[in-house]
Image (tube, rainbow, N blue to C red):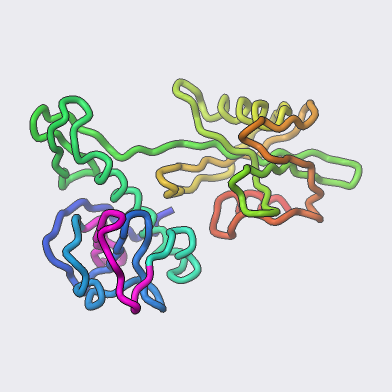
């Protein structure tokens, strides 16, 4: 989640302000130096950014987004472009969350430069996160994709067990809670039951809320639950789940990164 002392804003600007926290993005990557975020002096040596705006205030200090589309920059040796996930180890929790907000807004603005109704150019609104068509006044807001995550547990012969699964795109050896996107018209609870049955073939009960996390890859909102196993044998959904197993809480596999909601969910019940 964003820091409690963060206030959103949407104010286009024309110049780099060295007094701000600057989130500089090149496509989907974050521009950093060897110790953290690139500073104003380093960024001033680059070609003008395609988009600059204040995206909020943190601890009374403005947070500035600078954005260049993919492929238009050659960075000097003093700077590096890091994938957002990989940048967490360098910049820490709070700046990573601010960078996630910046990334989601940059992606939204970049993919909504033209109206989906009439095709005319859009403009940014300053009082909210929205783009408005300059011709027909149609408005659009940032896309958020809600995804439900369910940690399934049961009492086995060896004690408490979790059903964890791995997607084909996970790094080798990593498992996580079952997760999937909410369908139009579904409640979160309906999604949880459907996704579990579709992906691993089991039925659950006693669904309880755990927590949520904004996940800027590229615009997900993760919503986590824990549930009890009822019945069914594990059957992995082809193309979605590479493997799923019951694991003793005393012998868990490699888990997602510690800053993820999945890690916090699993760790909370160990």
Q: Is residue 15 above or below residue 142?
A: below
- Give the residue at x 32% y 55%: 27
Q: Is residue 176 above or below residue 75?
A: above
Residue furthest out toward the left: 135
Q: Report whether 235 appears left or right of 193.
A: right
Nearest the camera: 219 or 236? 236
Q: Is residue 30 magenta?
A: no
Nearest the camera: 210 or 96? 96
How many circles with numbers are drawn on the protein?
A: 0
Q: Report whether 93 appears left or right of 160.
A: left
Image coordinates of residue 64 in percent, x first then y, are: 24, 62
Residue furthest out toward the top: 185
- Give the residue at x 15% y 26%: 118
Image coordinates of residue 163 in percent, x first then y, are: 74, 41
Q: Quadrant of residue 32?
A: bottom left
Q: Is residue 211 above or below residue 47?
A: above
* Span colored in magenta: 54-80
Q: Is residue 145 above or below residue 74?
A: above
- Give the residue at x 76% y 54%: 252
Q: Is residue 116 visible?
A: yes
Image coordinates of residue 173 in percent, x first then y, are: 70, 54
Image coordinates of residue 43 in percent, x first then y, are: 24, 72
Residue furthest out toward the right: 157
- Give the residue at x 50% y 42%: 222
Q: Quadrant of residue 42?
A: bottom left
Q: Is residue 56 magenta?
A: yes
Q: Is residue 4 visible?
A: no
Q: Report whether 47 appears left or right of 98.
A: left
């Amino acid at each position: 989640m964003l820091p409690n002392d963060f206030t959103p804003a949407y104010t286009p600007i024309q110049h780099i302000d060295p007094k701000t926290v600057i989130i500089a993005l090149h496509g989907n990557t974050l521009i950093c130096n060897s110790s953290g975020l690139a500073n104003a002096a380093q960024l001033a040596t680059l070609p003008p950014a395609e988009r600059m705006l204040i995206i909020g205030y943190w601890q009374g200090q403005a947070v500035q987004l600078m954005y260049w589309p993919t492929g238009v920059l050659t960075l000097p040796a003093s700077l590096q472009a890091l994938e957002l996930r990989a940048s967490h180890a360098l910049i820490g929790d709070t700046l990573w969350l601010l960078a996630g907000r910046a990334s989601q807004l940059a992606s939204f603005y970049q993919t909504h430069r033209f109206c989906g109704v009439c095709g005319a150019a859009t403009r940014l609104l300053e009082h909210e996160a929205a783009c408005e068509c300059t011709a027909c006044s149609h408005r659009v807001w940032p896309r958020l994709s809600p995804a439900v995550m369910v940690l399934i547990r049961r009492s086995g012969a060896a004690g408490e067990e979790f059903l964890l699964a791995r997607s084909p795109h996970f790094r080798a050896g990593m498992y996580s809670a079952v997760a999937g996107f909410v369908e139009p018209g579904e409640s979160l609870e309906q999604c949880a039951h459907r996704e579990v049955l579709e992906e691993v073939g089991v039925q659950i009960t006693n669904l309880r809320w755990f927590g949520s996390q904004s996940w800027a890859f590229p615009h997900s909102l993760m919503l986590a639950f824990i549930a009890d196993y009822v019945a069914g044998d594990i059957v992995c959904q082809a193309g979605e789940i590479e493997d799923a197993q019951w694991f003793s809480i005393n012998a868990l596999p490699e888990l997602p990164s510690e800053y993820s909601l999945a890690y916090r969910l699993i760790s909370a019940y160990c």
